[in-house]
Image (tube, rainbow, N blue to C red):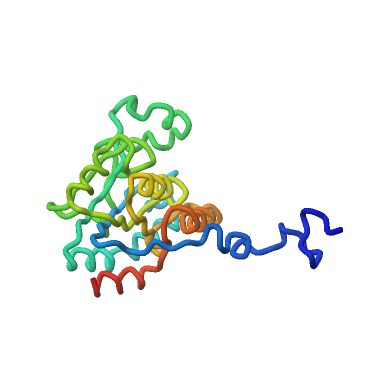
Amino acid sequence: MTPSNQTASGKGADDRSLDDNYKGVWDGRIGFGNKPALLVVDFMQGYTTPGSPLFAQGVVDAVANMPSLLDAARHSGIPVLHTNILYHAPDQIDGGIWVKKAPVMRAMVAGNPYAAFCPEVTPREDELVMTKQYASAFFGTSLASTLVAMGVDTLIITGCSTSGCVRATAVDGLQHGFRVIVVRDCVGDRHPAPHEANLFDIDSKYGDVISLNETLDHLATS
């Protein structure tokens, strides 16, 4: 009799690859809908400034990949939206429990250079900036109703961090009825392990994780 945790070949289930384990169960694709929007999540200088407690090389790399995507999105005429995190100084009371759990976030107040947008992704005057206090770009904001009013059905997500605000936004995007596309090259985290784990999980359950080149090809032909 084959033990319940082994295959007929004697190979334990835990030894199978993640792809094999998820195949046919958590590997569906949704693709682009009729009208996408590009969302740039929290690309602020606290994540890209050496010496900052929030500094993450993965975010530096992601920001460096953004200009071509922003140019393509703007050229195609799709909506481009940005988010940032800002708290009320001096006590960041609107940060609630999150700033108690992660006091490093207290730097996100008006006037602190760490709270400024990275130059490469500075919003244009005609691009909407939504300020949030928590991880998801949907939580406590009018993002969902704004996208619906625009006729958007697909949300292209970029930004940081992959395991935090990007993941939370991807999950909420799906739950608000949007097709979620995460651009692998344009999201970043402070360590490769949570970055890759969360991209795998998003791609399995909440949206499609695709390359920058795939995204550019779609925008060029749509």
Residue 142 in the figure: left or right of residue 185: left
State the residue in front, 26 or 42.
Answer: 26
Identified at 72% across, 58% down, the residue is 13
Dividing the image into 4 quarters, which one contains the N terminus? bottom right
Identified at 30% across, 57% down, the residue is 154
Res. 17 visible in picture: yes
Relative vertical location of residue 95 with respect to residue 125 in this rendering, above or below: above
The location of residue 45, given as percent across then percent down, is: 33, 49
Number of residue marks: 0
The location of residue 64, given as percent across then percent down, is: 34, 64
Identified at 44% across, 53% down, the residue is 206
Residue 109 in the figure: left or right of residue 164: left
The location of residue 129, given as percent across then percent down, is: 21, 46
Dividing the image into 4 quarters, which one contains the C terminus? bottom left
Which quadrant of the structure image shows residue 218?
bottom left
Which quadrant of the structure image shows residue 76?
bottom left
State the residue in front, 30 or 192.
Answer: 30
Q: Identify the residue at the far front of this view.
A: 1
The location of residue 118, given as percent across then percent down, is: 29, 53
Residue 4 in the figure: left or right of residue 140: right
